[in-house]
Amino acid sequence: MLGWAMAAGLAGCERPTAQPPLPPCRWVGPDPARGHRLRSADALPAPALTRRARVLVLGAGIAGLAALRRLHHDGVTDSWALELHDLSGGNSQGHTLAGMACPLGAHYLPVPGPQAEAVQALLLDLGLLRRTVRGLEPDERHLCHAPQERLFIDGAWQDGLLPSADDRPATLAQYRRFAQRVQDASATLGFSMPTLHSPWTPGHATLDAQPFATWLAREQLTDERLLGYLDYCCRDDYGAGLAQVSAWAGLHYFASRHGFHAPGDAEAEREPVFTWPQGNAFLAQAMAEPLRAHVLTGRTALRVQEERHGVDILVWDEGAQRAERWQAERVIVALPLFVAARLLADWADPLRAALDLTARRQPHAPWLVANLHLREPLLDRLGAPPAWDSVHFTPAGTSTALGYVDAMHQNWRPHPGPTVLTMYHALPVSQRAALLSDSAAAWGAKVLAELALLHPDAPFKIEAIDLARWGHAMSIPAPGVRGADGLRALRSARGRIRFAHSDLAGYSVFEEALTLGHEAAHVAQV
C-alpha cells in the first residue's frame, strides 16, 4: 500500500514532505459475478414465463447493438437484445466521477476509411460525418482537440508518441526501414479495416503464423525506440505485446490505417480521431437510445438450444431474480466465442467443433481501467504541454501501462481545473485472477504509483479512484488466430444461429464489431 509513495519519492524532487493517505478506491462498472454465473451454475432454473421474438440478439456490445439497429432499420421490429450488464455497449461503456464524464473502456475511433462502410453509415446518421463536394468530412467539433498526444522520454515530454530520432541516425534508419516494410506489405498483400471483405492469401497466413517479435528480428529491426513504440501500439489495440501478437496483426495495425511514417516524411500526418469525455460510450449510447425499449439489460443467457422450428433460450433476469424462456426464429450470438461455446453445449451442428476449437485457441487480454479525480492541475515537466493522451515510454516487454487520457481535454473551458484522468493497463493473462481477487485499494495504489513516475505531485491532488476490471476485455490476435478455419466457418454460418462479435475478426476494435453485427443482421433475415 506504500508503493505509490515510494514511486513519488523516486520520480523527482518537486514533492511535499508529508505523505498523504491513499485516496478512496472502489470498483465500478461490470460485475464479474454475473459473467461467472453461467460457469458456476450447478443446475439450470425452471423458467417462470415464456417470451417470443422473431430475432433475439444475445449481447448488447457494439456488435449486438449494430445487429439490433439494422434489424429495426430493415423493419424487423420484433427483435430484442439481451445484455448481461446493467449498461449496454460492452467495453465501450462510460462512467461519471465527480460530475465529469469519463470512459470505462474504449475511448476513441479513427475517422473511418472507405472500406468501413457500415461505420461511415452510422457516423452519417449521427451527424459526425457529412457529405460535401470534397467527399465525406468529419464534424471537427468531435475530433480530438490539439495537442493530441505526447510522450515522456529522456526526462521530458515530446510531441507525438513515436520517440524522437533527433541525433540518432541509427534509430531514424530503422524507422525508415520499418516504414518501407509496411508500405511493401500493403502494396503486395493488401490490408483493410475492417477485415471482413479483405482477401486472405498465403502471404497473410505466413505473417499470421509467426510472432511479430520474430518477424521484426528477421527483418533486422532491433532499435529499442522502434520496438518500444511498436510494443505500445500492440498493447493499446490488442492487449498484448510484440512477443504475443502475430506479425500479421503488427503490420495490420499500420497498413490498414495510416501507414507508418518516419520523422520528416512528407506524409507524416497525425491520424484524426473522434473522441468524447466518456469515450466510445458516446457512440454506444447513441446507438442504444432509439432501441431502448428493445435492449433488456441485466439478462444472463444460460442455455441456447436449436429446435426443429426455432431456437429456445433460457435466460436469467437479474432484476426480477427469475428465469425466462425465450423462443425465437433466429438468434444472433453477439458474445465472446468462449461464452458462446458454453451456451451451445448441446448444439447439434457441424460448426460445433469449429466453435469449440476456436474458443479454446483464442486468448483474451484482461484490462484495468482507472479513473482518477484530480482536483487541480498537475505540475508538469519540461517539453510538450498537456495533451489528450499522455504516455510514458518504456522498452518493449517491461510495462503493462498505456498512459492516461484527460477527460476534460475536449471541454472548451478557458483555463485548467479539476478533471478526471483515465489510466489503462493491458495486463498479462497471468494477472487475471489477481484482477478479480485483489482489492480496489491494492490496484489503486499500483495505478497511483505509475502516475507518480510522471507527476510526483499526483498523490497529493487525487481525490478518488474508480476502477473497472475487464477479465476478458479483448481477443488477442496471437499467431494462428486470425487465419483459423474455424473463424471463417463461424462468420459464414447460415442456420438459425448466427454469430456476431469482434472475436470473429481475431481482435477487438469498434470497426470490426460494428461491421460483423451489421452483416449478421442482414444474413439473419435471409
Image (cartoon, rainbow, N blue to C red):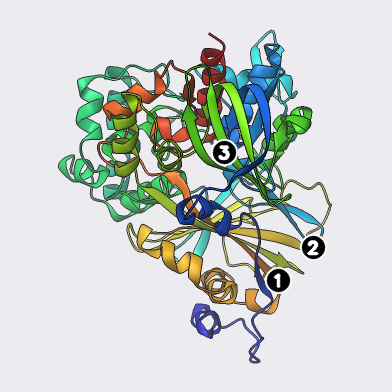
Total labels: the figure holds 3
Residue drawn at the location 59% of the way across and 49% of the way down? 105
Residue drawn at the location 48% of the way across and 65% of the way down? 435
Q: Position of residue 91 (x, y in %)?
A: 57, 45
Residue 260 seen from this side: no
Q: CA distance from mark 3 to mark 2?
A: 39 Å
Categorize mark 2 by other alpha carbons within 10 Å: few (<14), some (14-19), many (20+).
Answer: some
Q: CA distance from mark 1 to mark 3?
A: 40 Å
Disc 3 + disc 2, Cβ < 8 Å: no
Categorize mark 3 by other alpha carbons within 10 Å: few (<14), some (14-19), many (20+).
Answer: many
Q: Which mark is residue 464?
A: 1
Pointer 2 residue: 98
Between 415 and 408, the residue placed more toward the observer is 408
Q: Left or right of 390: which side holds 358? A: left
Image: 124 above or below 398: above
Residue type, mark 1 in image: Ala
Residue type, mark 3 in image: Leu
Q: Which mark is residue 314?
A: 3
Q: What secondary structure is found at the residue carrying circle 1?
A: strand
Q: What secondary structure is found at the residue carrying circle 3?
A: strand
Q: Position of residue 359 (x, y in %)?
A: 35, 40
Q: Position of residue 499 (x, y in %)?
A: 47, 27
Say whether disc 1 or disc 3 marks the residue closer to the N-terminus.
3
- Which one is in front in this view, the residue at disc 1 or the one at disc 3? 3
